[in-house]
Amino acid sequence: MKPGNNTRRFIDGIVEGLLVILMILMLTQVIWQVISRYALSRPSSITDELSRFLLIWIGILGASYVMGQKSHLAITLLYNYISQKMIKRAEVLVNLIIVLFSVAVLIIGGIRLVYITLKLGQTSASLQIPLGLIYIIIPVSGTLTVYYCIHDILNRVKSIPEDAKS
């Protein structure tokens, strides 16, 4: 067993569990919204706003999780025309670009967004939740993406044969 795999499985388990809980919460919120709107004729603005926030968290956190599981959309057209060694190098390069993007936009930009919204005291309309708490998922997701990319880079570099590294 490779070192770091236990940590990876632990993180995957936490993210999977959180995504399942968020999906269940969103499902119950949407069902209640439909019941309150059509059966009771009194739509709930709280469930509407909460389901939107849950969708944001599921989408952003889910994107990081999918990235880590290698289930994301990939353009593999060039893979038919280059060697296995070049494929591994290209994957390392792509992961490095994703790391740079994640650090610059998701982590640094996300932290700034959270800080500004908390500093300004912006709250949601119905729930009166500080929007910084909603946006906190952006730097968290960026950190997860960086972790998954670095983990993949290390695995790719280890799998390139010694004579092919030069």
Image (cartoon, helix red, strand yellow):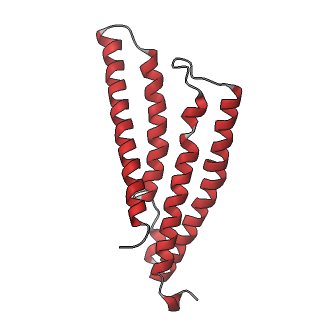
Q: Name the spot of residue 92 as percent of width and height, x first.
A: 54, 71
At 54% from the left and 73% from the top, the residue drawn is: 90
Q: Residue furthest left?
A: 39
Query: 4 above or below 48?
Result: below
Q: Name the spot of residue 166 as percent of width and height, x first.
A: 58, 89
Residue 80 location, quadrant: bottom left
At 69% from the left and 41% from the top, the residue drawn is: 112
Seen from the viewer's position, the closer of residues 130 and 83 is 130
Give the number of callouts: 0
Left-right relation of 109 to 157 = right
Q: Residue furthest bottom?
A: 163
At 63% from the left and 55% from the top, the residue drawn is: 103
Query: 145 above or below 125?
Result: below
Can residue 31 be seen by looking at this rendering? yes
Left-right relation of 62 to 41 = right
- Which part of the image, by quadrant, shows the N terminus? bottom left
At 56% from the left and 43% from the top, the residue drawn is: 138
Left-right relation of 102 to 14 = right
Seen from the viewer's position, the closer of residues 88 and 115 is 115
Can residue 83 be seen by looking at this rendering? no
Q: Name the spot of residue 66 as percent of width and height, x first.
A: 42, 53
Q: Residue furthest top?
A: 41
